[in-house]
Image: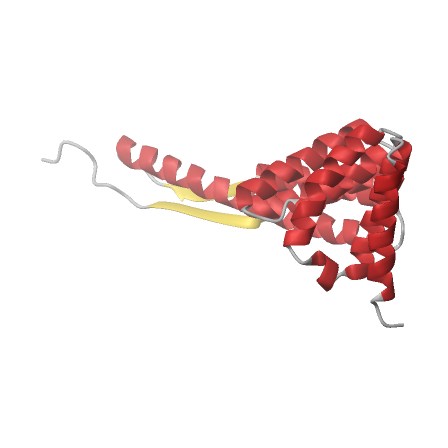
Amino acid sequence: MLKYPVFCAVELTFDCLAVMPGGIPFLHYLSVRRCHPMRIAIAVLFSAALLAGCASEVRERIASNYGRVGAAAIRQGDWDTARRAFARVTVNADLAELPAARRALAHYEYGRSLGVTCYFDRAEEELKTAFELDKQAGQPLYLSLVELARLNLDQGKYSQSAAYFERAIPLLEAAGVAKEAPMGYADILEEYARTLSGMGRTADAQLSVGRATTLRKGVPG
């Protein structure tokens, strides 16, 4: 005589596309016939792992969808919509534990949109988060540094702005941005010059403007 009932099949199906309000996936149990308790425990653990995977997939899909909304809003100059969209991107990207590089981009765009819409303190937090995630991912660090410099320049915080510019510019030089994107780099140098002027560093500001002018003259048309 068998001491325990014969292990029976536990029929489980998962549908990652089926979601409750709020985007939370739910689990369909088709049937669970009379089983050994250990078998049920294993099935429950397995189902929990699959459910976590489904939740991650849903969060990633939500992040991607709102990312497209945010990017379209930026192209249209609608920074309020962009800010709200990228807020959702960052939440879902972080919950889904997406790769650091993708999360860095989400926090960077959220920080930019916060800054443009004058949420300065929160913008700085998001841009610093983007910087740390870029560092973790081995990505270029100058994007977040330049935005942090601009954020402080817009608030008239010249010394803080200069500190960020002076961290970013050597990285930009090393990356060859002056050659690859001379007009964009000229813009950055002119913004740096404005920062230096605000600090009373007139001679340094003139040097930065001169470099920017040289870059612009070297661009055909």
Q: Is residue 88 visible?
A: no
The residue sitting at the left extreme is 1
Q: Position of residue 80 (x, y in %)?
A: 87, 41
Q: Is residue 194 visible?
A: yes
Name the one closer to the observer, 117 or 139. Answer: 139
Quarter where residue 218 is shown: bottom right
**Left or right: 160 with respect to 134?**
right
Query: How many numbered dots are placed on residues in this image?
Result: 0
The residue sitting at the front extreme is 203
Name the one closer to the observer, 26 or 73. Answer: 73
Q: Where the N terminus falls, by quadrant?
A: top left
Quarter where residue 133 is shown: top right
Residue 177, above or below 82: below
Instruction: Determine the residue positioned at 82% across, 48% down.
Output: 189
The residue sitting at the bottom extreme is 221
Q: Position of residue 121 (x, y in %)?
A: 79, 27
Instruction: Determine the residue positioned at 59% across, 37% down.
Output: 95
Name the one closer to the observer, 134 or 205. Answer: 205
Q: Where the C terminus falls, by quadrant?
A: bottom right
**Left or right: 219 with respect to 23?**
right
Instruction: Determine the residue positioned at 86% across, 61% down.
Output: 216
Name the one closer to the observer, 21 or 112. Answer: 112
Instruction: Determine the residue positioned at 69% across, 51% down.
Output: 172
Q: Position of residue 71 (x, y in %)?
A: 78, 53
Q: Position of residue 58 (x, y in %)?
A: 60, 46
> Colour scheme in the image?
secondary structure
**Left or right: 199 with respect to 91?**
right
Quarter where residue 201 is shown: top right
